[in-house]
Image: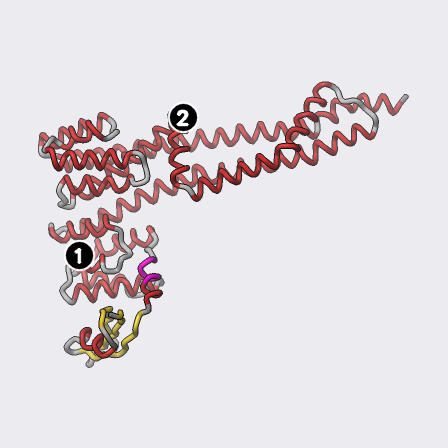
């Protein structure tokens, strides 16, 4: 079977058109499958496997998802149908791929396909998004579901942006300082040493120590740079290496450990609250929420807690307490919510608390990183100054006396 894209135009109003994708043996069969009363077939285009794979592999940027879900949520709250909301939002979009995807979803909705299936057919939305849309449609709160998705993605994007800002600039500054330091030790200090040798002056003890350190740098800087490049490449390409390094750093740096745990717990609680508030049962919500921790050591713990809760019948708070590394306060509040039938409210409270705490910890982390960067700058600049200027200052008087004799 081949895949075809069929464009239909309204017979009376040619400016109105619909686009369908269907599988058929040939173009004629595709035209018959896509044909609708009141429309005529304007174009039948066969899609190659390469173009299908490329389209399916393309994902929507997170910022565009926020705009999309916010816009659709606002129109649904104004009692505009989902089909019309997608039509209005897609009109005038600068991204032709997203526009085509939204029109395809709209056409599927008009043909009677469920809203979550229409979105899933595009294969550009992850399973959590599809599940939330399905739950919102089943509970009659589709607008709220889209709004929850927009809020969750915005929070995740905000934390990711702050983390990049906290690490990217200091890392670039430190790398520049290291390069400047190596340059000064290889060339500047070496020239100072040659200058002193040219006037036949023996260096004092401090200058001799500076020159000895420069000789060590000249012999080892290549190996240091190679090791630094290997470290950077490993960090960028190996998720397993990043996790192992992060675990070691967390053991020795409490602030980093607190920040990472806050980010992970905030992501889990926020996703759990979003899913549960939109009508997904707690067992399935907890299993889906564990997916946000894939790639971390905590993922298997939360999956096990979800399985224990679903299979054993123990309270959810007890399953988390036995298996998941959550803060005791979180488990306590979830237990209160279960016993008092106020779990949605307790999860919302925990979500807000942890988002605020995570922002505060990230602010402290940023200040520490900035201080470390400044301290390293002072130390490295001190080495540059000591290596290039201090021997001249110390040997200057002796050189002048030698010239007068």
Can residue 16 be spotted in the picture?
no
Question: Image point 40% across, 26% down: which residue?
Answer: 253
> In the rendered image, which residue does mark 2 sit on?
253
- Up the image or down, 169 lies above or below 195; here it is below
Where in the figure is residue 58, as x and y percent of width and height? Answer: 34, 58
Instruction: Tell me, yes or no, whether the highlighted magenta stretch contains residue 150.
Output: no
Q: Nearer the viewer, residue 16 or 97?
A: 97
Dominant SS of magenta comes to helix
Q: Nearer the viewer, residue 82 or 61?
A: 61
Q: Nearer the viewer, residue 33 or 260?
A: 33
Q: Quadrant of the N terminus?
A: bottom left
Where in the figure is residue 191, as x and y percent of width and height? Answer: 74, 34
Q: State the image quarter where residue 314 is shown.
A: top left
The residue carrying pointer 2 sits among few (fewer than 14), some (14 to 19) or many (20 or more) residues within 10 Å by Cα, namely few
- Up the image or down, 120 lies above or below 381; here it is below
Question: Image point 27% across, 76% down: which residue?
Answer: 44
Q: Quadrant of the C terminus?
A: top right
Q: Label 2's element?
A: loop
The residue carrying pointer 1 sits among few (fewer than 14), some (14 to 19) or many (20 or more) residues within 10 Å by Cα, namely few
Q: State the image quarter where residue 266 is shown.
A: top left
Disc marking residue 78: 1
Please identify, in this view, whether the residue under mark 1 or under mark 2 is nearer the observer: 2
Q: State the image quarter where residue 2 is shown.
A: bottom left
- Magenta segment boundaries in residue numbering: 53-57
Can residue 102 be spotted in the picture?
yes
Question: Image point 15% across, 40% down: which residue?
Answer: 283
- Up the image or down, 39 lies above or below 56; here it is below
Whichever of labels 1 and 2 marks the residue nearer the N terminus, that label is 1
Spatial CA span between label 1 and label 2: 50 Å
């Amino acid at each position: 079977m081949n895949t075809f894209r069929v464009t239909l135009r309204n017979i009376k109003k040619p400016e109105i058109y619909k686009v369908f994708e269907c599988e058929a043996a040939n173009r004629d069969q595709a035209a018959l499958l896509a044909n609708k009363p009141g429309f005529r077939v304007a174009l039948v285009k066969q899609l190659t496997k390469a173009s299908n794979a490329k389209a399916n592999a393309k994902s929507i940027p997170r910022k565009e998802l926020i705009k999309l879900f916010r816009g659709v949520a606002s129109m649904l709250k104004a009692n505009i149908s989902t089909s019309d909301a997608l039509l209005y939002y897609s009109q005038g979009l600068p991204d032709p791929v997203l526009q085509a995807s939204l029109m395809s979803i709209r056409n599927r909705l008009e043909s009677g396909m469920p809203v979550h299936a229409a979105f899933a057919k595009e294969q550009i939305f992850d399973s959590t998004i599809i599940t939330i849309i399905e739950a919102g449609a089943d509970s009659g709160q589709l607008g709220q579901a889209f709004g929850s998705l927009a809020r969750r993605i915005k929070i995740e994007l905000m934390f990711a942006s702050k983390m990049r800002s906290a690490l990217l600039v200091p890392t670039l500054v430190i790398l520049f300082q290291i390069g400047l330091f190596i340059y000064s030790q290889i060339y500047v200090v070496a020239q100072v040493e040659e200058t002193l040798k040219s006037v036949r002056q023996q260096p004092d003890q401090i200058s001799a120590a500076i020159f000895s350190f420069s000789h060590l740098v000249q012999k080892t800087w290549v190996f240091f740079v190679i090791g630094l490049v290997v470290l950077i490449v490993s960090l960028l390409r190996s998720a397993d290496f990043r996790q192992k390094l992060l675990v070691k750093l967390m053991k020795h740096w409490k602030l980093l450990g607190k920040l990472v745990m806050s980010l992970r717990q905030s992501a889990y609680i926020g996703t759990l609250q979003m899913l549960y508030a939109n009508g997904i049962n707690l067992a399935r919500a907890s299993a889906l929420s564990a997916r946000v921790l894939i790639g971390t050591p905590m993922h298997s713990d939360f999956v096990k807690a979800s399985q224990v809760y679903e299979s054993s019948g123990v309270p959810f708070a007890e399953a988390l307490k036995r298996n998941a590394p959550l803060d005791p306060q979180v488990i306590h509040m979830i237990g209160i919510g279960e016993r008092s039938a106020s779990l949605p409210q307790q999860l919302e409270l925990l979500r807000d608390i942890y988002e605020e705490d995570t922002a505060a910890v990230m602010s402290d982390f940023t200040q520490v990183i900035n201080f470390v960067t400044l301290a390293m700058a002072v130390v490295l600049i001190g080495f540059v100054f000591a290596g290039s200027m201090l021997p001249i200052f110390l040997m200057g008087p002796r050189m002048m006396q030698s010239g007068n004799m």
